[in-house]
């Protein structure tokens, strides 16, 4: 039985609200938590297959040119080294197109520093690394293009509505400001790693991936084989943040090496390799123009950006994504231009678009509020559109104003410093700032199978199966909660199996669609099971209650174990992106409030406290959702204060390609963060009324901190991150 949901009308059933098990929404522990903290959860580098060989990637030490010779013979003569592989199929990032487009053996064209050019495989990791370090190459270098300002550009998105220039001229108050954000790295805790093993034509890959259903196809394309012959397993993933949405070169290299050597091969990337060889977030230059009338109504809104990527890449950081619908203004201009650079492929890094587009928009709104003499919250509320200002469609549920009001009350916004630079405690200048959060919402096609069966002890057991991943977000927990809720079972009687490409295909973890998509698939499978049970017992489905392993309806009462006496009951659920998605603008919203102290002598900024309020539809697990918001806010703190990938303008190498020099916020940088989740159901979003929350906590967070720094110091810094040198 397969229940398919198609959204040609908003989901009217809020069935989860009527369930009695009491699991959904609760701050329950992750069922996988104990495995992780006891070291029994198997991560990508821990499969230790018999006869395994080790591969280490060798990468181009220059950013543009051609490799004319690779000294493989000398390396293959070294003790322990098995093979030096220079297979064209892994020479370019799989994200950069299929193998057909990559050069075949021989002279190898290099597009960025760090591009893989060879794999040294040896009996031990040490021997492979030694061989990789000793490998000699000859090459012809060309001048690399590193600076977006001097690069050739291509036009991306371009929207013009009305006449922004005229609106700017006629306005009562305007802001015309240019902001800069640097390249970011995903910095997932677990570096990329793949272990490949072949049995005949069947390839199994154990690794760290976000979206298995897509990843097997990417690998099939790269290798030129059939995806049906690929089995991928990623039961535990130590973070991805976009860098594992697509497979990285180590997966292709491991698969090729394992085939050539006819034994399992593991290839792990070092941290510098993750920086240089997987994915970066583009640097951005963003011009924000705001025009407002005397009542604080926006009449014009412009958001034009310069981003970058490699030649030929289609992705461009979608910085204007939420700007399109967040605020009203008749005259609009949004544009994205793409500079073609010789830097590592730019792609999706946590909350692509809003991560860097929302803080700058919210900085500009802060500048405008000051010019108008308005409370920043008031300015935002005056400009909430009734309908999408460009597409003239309605919004689904939108808790933006409520998030601002709730946050203001919780934070004590009315007691904020009202004079920029005017509140001082000794050496420290104190400031307060706020910003809005917005992130587009979507779902992906997803299926899940749920099976009700009897465990050995006779009790009822639900097994949830999908190739969905848990990248640290809490998928195991939330899917178990949905199934337990729907089938009336405690968490301990639900087993969720994930991260295996042979299970029903899901949408994977990415773009914050994971929980909504796979959660809906599990919900639909459970609905189908409830129908089957009703039919079996001759009961009316609407009157069926399932709780604590019992089925009740009117005077009928059965244990689930009895219902399952003559065999298990199984069903699949499938959700597909709905027809209504084009007719209703869906997004998650929120607001941040923070207090900073900026040292007047050293220029260092300390975040003192921060509140984030978020409306993301139904919350499936208060604890894991809150943790996602903490994580997002930490990203925001990093973006505001420390995170910046620095390329040497002369040769394009990443100067700070490790976590010692690429400064992520650490515990000492972090005050207690307060997260408030609003009670919301979004009937347009999916059958379980959830929206994406994973990335929401980041989408504007940095802007609140930078607004607070202005409030503390009276200095507007428009160049992220706000390091001390910029403040002094
Ligand atoms: Mo998302 S870019 O996969 O964090």
Image: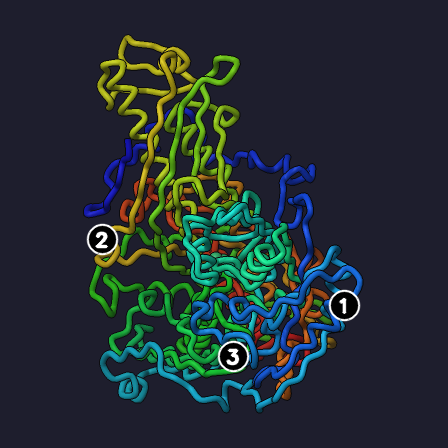
Residues 94 and 357: in front is 94
Q: Earlier in the sequence, mark 3 or mark 1?
A: 1
Q: Which type of secondary structure does the marked residue at label 2 adopt?
A: helix
Q: Residue at label 3?
A: 180
In the image, what residue occupies the spot 73% across and 76% down?
602
| Rendering coords of residue 430 (x, y %) | 63, 67
Residues 542 and 653: in front is 653
Residues 102 and 366: in front is 102
Image quadrant assignment for residue 97: bottom left
| Rendering coords of residue 720 (x, y %) | 56, 75
Residue 580 is marked as 2
Q: Earlier in the sequence, mark 3 or mark 2?
A: 3
* Quadrant where the image shows the C terminus: bottom right
Looking at the picture, does residue 8 appear above or below residue 384?
A: above
Whether residue 343 can be seen here: yes
Image quadrant assignment for residue 128: bottom right
Residues 496 and 8: in front is 496
């Amino acid at each position: 039985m397969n229940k398919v949901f198609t959204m040609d009308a908003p989901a009217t059933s809020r069935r989860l609200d009527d369930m009695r098990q009491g699991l959904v929404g609760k701050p329950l522990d992750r069922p996988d938590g104990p495995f992780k903290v006891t070291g029994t959860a198997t991560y990508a580098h821990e499969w230790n297959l018999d006869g395994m060989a080790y591969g280490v990637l060798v990468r181009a030490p220059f950013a543009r040119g051609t490799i004319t010779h690779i000294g493989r013979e000398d390396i293959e003569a070294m003790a322990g080294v098995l093979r030096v592989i220079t297979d064209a199929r892994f020479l370019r990032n799989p994200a950069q197109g299929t193998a057909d487009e990559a050069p075949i053996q021989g002279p190898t064209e290099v597009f960025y520093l760090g591009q893989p050019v060879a794999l040294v495989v040896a009996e031990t990791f040490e021997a492979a690394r030694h061989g990789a370090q000793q490998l000699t190459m000859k090459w012809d270098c060309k001048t690399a293009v590193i600076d977006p300002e001097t690069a050739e550009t291509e036009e991306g998105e371009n929207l013009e509505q009305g006449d922004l220039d005229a609106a700017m001229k006629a306005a009562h108050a305007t802001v015309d400001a240019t902001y800069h954000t640097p390249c970011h790295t995903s910095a997932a805790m677990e570096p990329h790693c793949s272990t490949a093993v072949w049995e005949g034509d069947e390839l199994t890959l154990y690794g760290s991936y976000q979206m298995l259903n897509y990843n097997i196809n990417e690998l099939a394309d790269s290798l030129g084989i059939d995806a049906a012959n690929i089995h991928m397993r990623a039961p535990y993933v130590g973070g991805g943040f976009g860098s594992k949405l697509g497979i990285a070169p180590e997966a292709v290299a491991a698969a090729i090496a394992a085939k050539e050597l006819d034994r399992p091969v593991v290839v792990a990337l070092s941290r510098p390799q993750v920086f240089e060889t997987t994915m970066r977030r583009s640097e951005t230059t963003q011009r924000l123009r705001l025009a407002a009338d005397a009542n604080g109504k926006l009449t014009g809104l412009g958001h034009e950006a310069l981003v970058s990527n490699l030649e030929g890449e289609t992705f461009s950081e979608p910085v204007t994504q939420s700007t399109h619908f967040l605020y009203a203004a008749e005259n609009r201009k949004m544009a994205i231009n793409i500079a073609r650079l010789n830097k590592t492929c730019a792609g999706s890094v946590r909350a692509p678009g809003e991560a860097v587009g929302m803080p700058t928009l919210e900085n500009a709104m802060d500048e405008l509020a000051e010019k108008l003499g308005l409370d920043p919250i008031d300015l935002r509320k005056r400009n909430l559109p009734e309908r999408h200002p460009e597409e003239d469609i309605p919004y689904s549920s939108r808790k933006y104003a409520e998030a601002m009001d709730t946050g203001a009350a919780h934070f004590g916004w009315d007691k904020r410093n009202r004079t920029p630079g005017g509140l001082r405690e000794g050496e420290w200048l104190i400031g307060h700032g706020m910003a809005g959060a917005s992130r587009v919402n979507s779902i992906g096609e997803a299926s899940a199978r749920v099976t009700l069966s009897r465990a050995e002890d006779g009790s009822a057991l639900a097994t949830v199966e999908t190739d969905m991943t848990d990248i640290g977000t809490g998928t195991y927990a939330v899917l178990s909660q949905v199934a337990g809720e729907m089938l009336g079972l405690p968490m301990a009687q639900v087993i969720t199996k994930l991260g295996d490409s042979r299970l029903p295909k899901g949408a994977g973890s990415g773009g914050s669609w994971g929980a909504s998509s796979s959660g809906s698939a599990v919900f639909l499978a459970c609905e189908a099971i409830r129908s089957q049970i009703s039919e079996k017992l001759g009961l009316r489905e609407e009157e069926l209650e399932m709780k604590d392993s019992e089925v009740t309806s009117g005077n009928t009462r059965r244990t689930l174990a009895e219902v399952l006496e003559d065999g298990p009951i199984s069903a699949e659920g499938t959700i597909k992106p709905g027809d209504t998605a084009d007719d209703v603008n869906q997004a998650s919203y929120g607001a941040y409030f923070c207090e900073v102290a900026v040292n007047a002598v050293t220029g260092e900024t300390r975040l003192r406290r921060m509140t984030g309020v978020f409306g993301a539809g139904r919350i499936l697990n208060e604890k894991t959702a809150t943790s996602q918001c903490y994580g997002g806010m930490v990203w925001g703190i990093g973006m505001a204060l420390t995170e910046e990938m620095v390329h040497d303008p002369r040769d394009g190498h990443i100067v700070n390609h490790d976590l010692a020099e690429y400064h992520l916020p650490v515990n000492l940088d972090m005050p207690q963060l307060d997260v408030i989740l609003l009670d919301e159901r979004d009937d347009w979003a999916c059958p379980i009324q959830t929206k994406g929350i994973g990335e929401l906590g980041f989408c504007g967070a940095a802007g609140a901190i930078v607004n607070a720094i202005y409030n503390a110091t009276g200095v507007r810094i428009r160049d992220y991150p706000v390091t001390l040198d910029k403040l002094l």
